[in-house]
Image: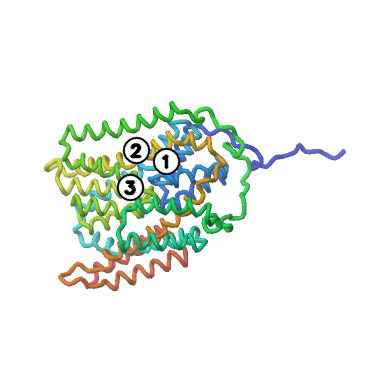
Amino acid sequence: MPLTLPAMHSPIDTTPAPVSLRSAFWYWLKLGCISFGGPAGQIAMMHAELVEKRRWISERRFLHALNYCMLLPGPEATQLAIYIGWLLHRTRGGMIAGLLFLLPSLLLLIILSWIYMAYGHVGAIAGVLYGVKPAVVALVLAAAWRLGRRTLRTPGLQLIAFLSLLALAVFQLPFPLLVLCAALAGAAGGYLLPAQFHPSNQSHGGKQSYGPALIDDDTPTPPHARFGWPRLLMTSLLGILLAVLGWLLLAWLGGREHMLAQMAVFFSKAALLTFGGAYVVLPYLHQGAVEHYHWLASSQMMDGLALGETTPGPLIMIVAFIGFVGAWGQAVFGEHLLLAGVCGALVTAWFTFLPSFIFILAGAPLVEATRGNLHLDAPLNAVSAAVVGVIASLALFFGQHVFRLEQAVPQWDWLAIALAVVASVALIKYQIGTIKLLLACGIFGLVLSYLP
């Protein structure tokens, strides 16, 4: 009689075992340490690990959470990590995911900011920054190109992107007004010209199956994720209370006009304007931190962006550099410059990222209750198109500061322009990684600084 073996099931056909909080802790810490490449790269990392490999969450649930995060002000990759951590392990899971995603970047930027302020005059460091800054312009251009290829699929969306570029680069309209106009145009266009705002080629070939997930498409909403008005109001009020108490403490320690209290108010506003990612809000940060408050110089702002591109985590963490350099430069604690810088970095980070936690912990249950609602597609597509124009205008803005030599008669720095062109080709055509590009440009600038 032939031997009959029991039926074997492939691991991909079985639902993964429940995830412990400890396992999630180590995953979020790892992600916070290796999450280079900006929001697109970070989201891709989470998708590859959580959807494809570990199967903690299905692709449809993952994309549903991502769509909500894209509608919010703030860094969408950070908010997505908070959302998934919360869905898996309640509030403490969301807190752990968000904090571990942010802390490595914050600590690294504090260290780099200290080196910059203490030794930034050294020729070698100045040379590295000279090579990296044109690469930053190329990164912004590449971000606009890649987002545009995915987003601008109809003439209507292309027109919105072009008008957004003109609105910011020529007429300097405020960004919140631009987002509102784009959303209204999308909402109206979704009814009047649906083919322009619901492009038929938006599909990417259907849903890819990676096997059953721990939180699958048809998995019932867990009890802690069910919507309730009392929970929404309590969480929102708690978040507002934390922000107000933080500002009152700073005002009590130094007065309402103290620099740290001013930073708290300014970066709270900035946190509510970061639609579309850090590249979009950087002009607002420059306007406030450089032109209005004079916390740092425009060249320092560009140096901070270059440092921010070399660290993991959200690019908006550049606010920590602004806070560190501003508090150090203004000597808010007298001779204790390092203490001032660290406090400035912590204050800016707290008031910038606190809203992201509140938006998710308060609003995610409502989003879970509305899965399958597609009414926001057209406004979201229009806002995404406007973001392409905003990022393109930001590249022009950075180019004005990077490619002009600071002399009595401003002149073009043709070497920096050539380096930016080469970096753009490397990013767009040859798909070179961000870290490799920044490393190569930094080495080029370092070698250049030693040439006679």
Residue identifier under label 2: 354
Where is 242 relative to 309, above or below?
above
Tell me the quadrant of the picture where the N terminus can be found. Answer: top right
> As drawn, which residue projects farthest toward the top?
230
Question: Which mark lies nearer to you, 1 or 2?
Answer: 2
For marks 3 and 2, the one nearer the N-term is: 3
Instruction: In this rendered view, identify the residue nearer to me: 202 or 414.
Output: 202
Query: Which of the two residues, 438 or 354, is positioned nearer the viewer here?
Result: 354
Label of residue 317 in the image: 3
State the residue at coordinates (15%, 70%).
Answer: 408
What separation in Å lies between label 3 and label 2 (alpha carbons)? 13 Å
Extreme-right residue of the structure: 1
Separation of disc 1 and disc 2 at Cα? 19 Å
Q: Is label 3 in a helix, a strand or a loop?
A: helix
Instruction: State the residue in front, 105 or 449.
Output: 105
Q: Secondary structure at mark 2?
A: helix
The residue beneath circle 1 is: 29
The amino acid type found where label 1 is placed reads Leu
Provide residue 291's location: percent of width, then percent of height. 21, 54
Residue 442 visible in the picture: no
Tell me the kind of residue under disc 3. Answer: Met
| Amino acid bearing label 2 | Leu
What residue is at 37 percent from the left and 64 percent from the top?
138
Q: Which of the 4 quarters of the picture holds residue 250?
A: top left
